[in-house]
Image (spheres, helix red, strand yellow):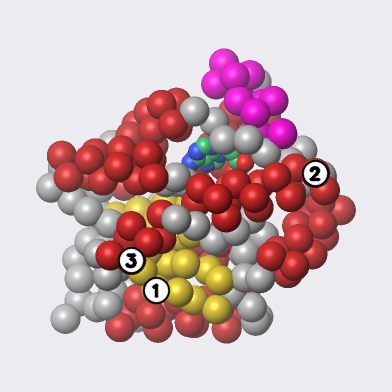
Amino acid sequence: MTNTSARFLIVGPQGSGKGTQGVRIAESFGIPVVSTGDIFRANIKEGTDLGKKVQAITAAGNLVSDELTGELVRDRLAQNDAQPGFLLDGYPRNRAQVAHLDEFLAGRGEELDAVIELDVPRAESIERLSLRAQEQGRADDTDEAIAHRLDIYERETAPILAVYGEKGIVDKIDGVGSLDEITARIMDALAARGFTPATA
Ligand code: AMP
């Protein structure tokens, strides 16, 4: 059986490659990636009011308020291109955001279909993030901010997997390997749930 909707979430520590894999998976399914981190970075770059509000918070590796982030995601998911499906990256990031998202989706008669957990050891994440810092110079890729963001991930974000795990929608994917290997693992897990891209 092939599912018609494709509402996915990708979760993993910073440096797990979730951004890269998220784009690949979303492209295969013809759905948009909704990345709160990307939206914040674009606003900071353009100097919008939202960007000014969140600049210092994101640079320190802290979380932007649930209220502001929730509003942003609701607006984005209301757009036309997100109606057939979407891949969320970086949201929800704590239990309060899970409750908020689930309530919002339930109001539309929807729910998340699958949660992809990218499993990467902390040491490997730190190594990848340090490399990215040299290559891209992201403001939140300093040693201090990296450690802080990984702590927040372990404390606040990892527990959301238990919530979705109870619903039986989490696939834990080994995030160590080549980009293509990891994409194939994710696509296999989604196929096992009945999610295959229309063109495949
Ligand atoms: P990311 O690219 O997903 O690591 O996000 C970069 C930064 O944006 C994070 O360190 C937070 O400061 C902020 N951010 C992104 N998503 C969220 C979210 N769901 N809740 C709060 N802050 C967020």
- Asked if the stretch drawn in magenta spans residue 55, the answer is yes
Does the closest atom of ligand 1 sit within 8 Å of the Cβ of label 2? no
Question: From what the image shows, is residue 151 above or below residue 55?
Answer: below
Question: Magenta stretch?
Answer: 49-60
Query: Label 3 belongs to which residue?
Result: 165
* Image disc number at residue 185: none
* Image disc number at residue 144: 2
Q: Amino acid type of disc 2?
A: Glu
Q: Amino acid type of disc 1?
A: Asp
Q: Amino acid type of disc 3?
A: Gly
- First-in-chain label (1 vs 3): 3
Element at label 2? helix
| Front-most of residues 73 and 124 | 124
- First-in-chain label (3 vs 2): 2
Front disc: 1 or 3: 3
In the image, 149: left or right of 166?
right
Residue at 79% in and 64% down: 127
Query: Label 1 belongs to which residue?
Result: 171
**Counting other residues with Cα less than 10 Å from the Cα at mark 2, is it few (<14), some (14-19), or many (20 or more)?**
few
- Asked if the stretch drawn in magenta spans residue 196, the answer is no
| Alpha-carbon span between mark 2 and mark 1 | 31 Å
Coordinates of residue 187 in the picture (x, y in percent): 42, 78
In the image, 175: left or right of 86?
right
Residue at 62% in and 64% down: 16
| Front-most of residues 33 and 92 | 92
**Counting other residues with Cα less than 10 Å from the Cα at mark 3, is it few (<14), some (14-19), or many (20 or more)?**
some
| Front-most of residues 121 and 197 | 121
Residue 116 shows up from this direction: yes
Q: Quadrant of the N terminus?
A: bottom left
